[in-house]
Amino acid sequence: MARFVVRRTLSALALLFATSVVVFGIFEVIPSYNPARAIAGRNANAETVAVVSRKFGFNKPVYTQYVNTMRLIFTGQLIDYNDQLNVVDQFKQRFPATLSLVIPSALIWLLAAIMLGSISALKAGKFADRGLTVFAIVGVSIPIFLLGAVLLYWFTFRLTIFPNTGYVPLTSDPVQWANHLILPWISIAVLSIGFYSRVLRSNVLDMINQDHVRTAKAKGLSQQRVFTHHVLRNSLMPIVTMFGLDFATLLGGAALVTETLFNIPGIGQYEAQAIGNLDVPPILVGSMFTAFFVVLFGALVDVLYAVLDPRIRLSG
Amino acid sequence: MAERLLEVDDLRVSFATEDGIVRAVDGISFTLDRGEVLAIVGESGSGKSVTSMTLMGLTRGPNARFEGSAKLKGEELITASEGKLQRIRGAEIAMIFQDPISSLSPVHRIGDQIVEQIRAHDKKISKADALDRAVDLMERVGIPHARGRARGFPHEFSGGMRQRAMIAMALSLSPSVLIADEPTTALDVTIQAQILNEVKELKEHSDSGIIFVTHDLGVVADIADRVIVMYAGRVVEQGTLDEIFYDPQHPYTWGLLGSVTRMDRDPPKRLPSIPGLPPSLVNAPKGCHFRPRCPHAFERCTEVPPLEARVPEAPDHLDRCWLEVDDKRSRREVAGRIGLVQDTTVAA
C-alpha cells in the first residue's frame, strides 16, 4: 500500500509537470498571440504594450517565463491577464459552485444508470429495453448546450417552474440552491446516464450467464439477492472506472458549457471565459487542476477495484 | 424399503433456438431412493446436465419447454412456483458443479458463500452460528485450518480445495438429493480420486440420494448403484451397475465400456474409440440416434426403438436397441472383452 501511494504520488507530479509544460508551450507557438496587448487594453499604443510586456516578463526567454509562472501559481500570486484577478483565489471561490453542480449530478447519473441499465438487461429485447435503448442513444447524442437550452426554454421560460439561471450557495438557502441547480444537474447527467446504462446492460447480460450466478441460484437465493449480490456486484467494475474519470474531469472544470449556459459561477465558467480570451493563467491552472483530479481519482478507482475484486492487487 | 426421493416420469426438455427446436432431453424416467447413487452417463450434449439442472429449475427460461413430470417426495418440480423452487434449491436438492473455479463467486469469501446459502433457508440463524456451521462443514470435507480458510477467496484455494468447498456448500443444509454434475472433470487425476472418496464417504455416512453425472465409466463402477446411459438426448440403456457393466444391451454402451482403459488387462495397441460425432440435436437422425455411428445398424434402426425391458430375466434393465438379446451378446464380444467392433465403413 505504501509503495502504491508513493508511486502514484510520483506519477501525479510527473503528469502535473507535463501538463503545465504542454499547456504553456501551446500558447508560445500560437501565432500573433501577445498577452501584453490583451492586458494593456484595446486602445493602448505600442509603448504601453512594451511597458506591460516588460512588467510581466513577456520579453524574457520561455523557460524563465515558465519558471516565473509556476512560482506565482504555487505562491498564490498569479493573476489572469484579462481581469487582473488572482487566479488561485478565483479557483478557491468558484470551487464550491462547481462541487454543488457536479456531486449531486454524479449521484443522479449513477443511480439512474444503474437502475435503467439493470431494467434494460432484465427486460432484454422487450418493450422496456427498446424504450430505454432509444433514450440512451438520444441521451448520448444530444449536445449538452442543446439539451440545456431546451430545458431552460421549457422549464424556465414557458412553464416557469425553475428560476432563470444563477446560483445560490447551499449555506445561504438549501431550497433555492437545489431549485437553481436541478436543470443543470439533469443537463450533465443525461449524457452519462445514457452511456453508463448501456455499458451496464451489456455487463449484466454477460454476468447473468456466468457459472457462479447459476450456483447462486442453485443455493436457493431469492432472485433479488442473486441479482444484487452476484450479478450487479460483478457488473459494476467498468462503471467504476468510467465514473472516476468523468467525475474527475468535471470537478476540474469540464462543465464549461453547463456553467456558462446556466450562469453558475464555477470553475467551468471561469475557464470558458479564459479560453475565449486566450487568457493563459486560468487555462494553465485549470489544466493542472483537472490533471490533479484525474490522477487522484485514478488512484481511488484502483483502490476501489481492489476492494470490489479481491483478485486484484494494488501495484504502482 | 428406503424412502423414495425422486420420481421422474418421461421428462422432456426442449429449447427453441434460432436453428430450430433442440430436444435436449427426449424422455427420461427414473427413481432415486435414499442412500442410493444413480449415475447418468453420456458424452457432452447427451442431455445429462440438462436433466439434472431441470430438477432444480435451473433450465427455466423463455425458450425452454418442459413435458412430463419430476416429483420430489411426491411434489411436482416441473410446474412448481419459483418461490417453492427457491425453498427446494440448496436445501432439498443441492448441486455440486463441474468447474469449481468458475462456479464459486470470485468476489465473496468462501465462508460467506456457504453462510449465504445457510441463511437463505434458515432466517433465524445468526451470522456467527452460520459461520460456525460452515467451518464445521469445511472440516468435514477435509479442508485443513477451516476457520482461517473460510476467510479466503476462491482464487486463494487450489482446485481440489475449491471443489471441497463446493461440496461443503452443497451439504450445508443436509439435502435429500445431491446432484454432482461432473464434479471431477475439471480436476487433476490425483485430486479426482480424493474428491471421489469424499463422495463415497457421503454415500456411506449420509442418507442423501446422489445423482452422479459423468462421462467417466471408471468413476461409475466405483460408486454407482444404478446407471442411466444417455445419448443425444435419449436414454439408450438403464439398469443396475452389474447389468450395465456385465450384460450391456446397447451398442453405445459397448462402445463406452470398450473405450475404458483397464489396468488389469494388457494395454491395447491403440485406444479404442467410437468413430464419428454425436448428432446435432436440431437435426437428429431418423430412428435410433446412434444409427449413423453404429456398426451393427440394420434397416429397422430407422424406426425409433422404444426403451423397454428386453432381457427376460431382468425386468428393470431397459434399452433402446432392436437387436435380439442373444445376437447382442455375441456381437459385443470384441477380442475377449466387451466393445464396439471397429467398422471401417462407418464415416469417421
Image (cartoon, coloured by chain):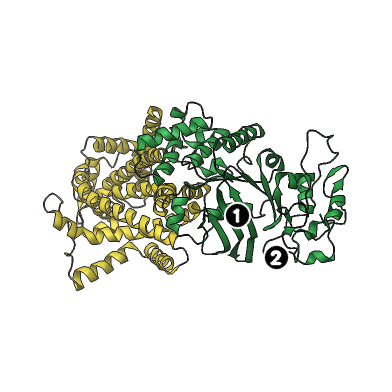
Residue tagged 2: B283
In primary-sequence order, the first of circles 1 and 2 is: 1
> What is the residue that sits farthest to the bottom in this orientation?
A158
Q: Nearer the viewer, residue A17 or B191?
A: B191
User: Which chain is yellow in the rendering?
Assistant: A
Point 85% across, 62% down: residue:
B298
Instruction: From the image, tell me which residue sits under label 1.
Output: B51
Nearest-to-viewer mark from 1 and 2: 1
Left or right of residue A40: residue B250? right
Q: Residue furthest left?
A: A172
Q: Nearer the viewer, residue A289 or A62?
A: A289
Placement of B213 over or under B76, stated as above or below: above
Q: Quadrant of residue B70?
A: bottom right
Q: In screen coordinates, is B262 left or right of B153?
A: right
Q: Residues within 10 Å of mark 1 (few under 14, many from 20)?
A: many
Seen from the viewer's position, the closer of residues B207 and A48 is: B207
- Residue B136, relative to residue B92: is it above or below? above
- Residue A285 seen in render: yes
The chain holding disc 2 is: B
Q: Amino acid at mark 2?
A: Asn
Chain letter for the green colouring in the rendering: B
The chain identifier of the residue carrying mark 1 reads B
Q: Is residue B110 left or right of residue A278?
A: right
Vertical position of residue A72 compared to residue A185: above or below: above
- Residue at x-position 40% and y-position 68%: A131
Image x and y of residue A94, in percent: 20, 48
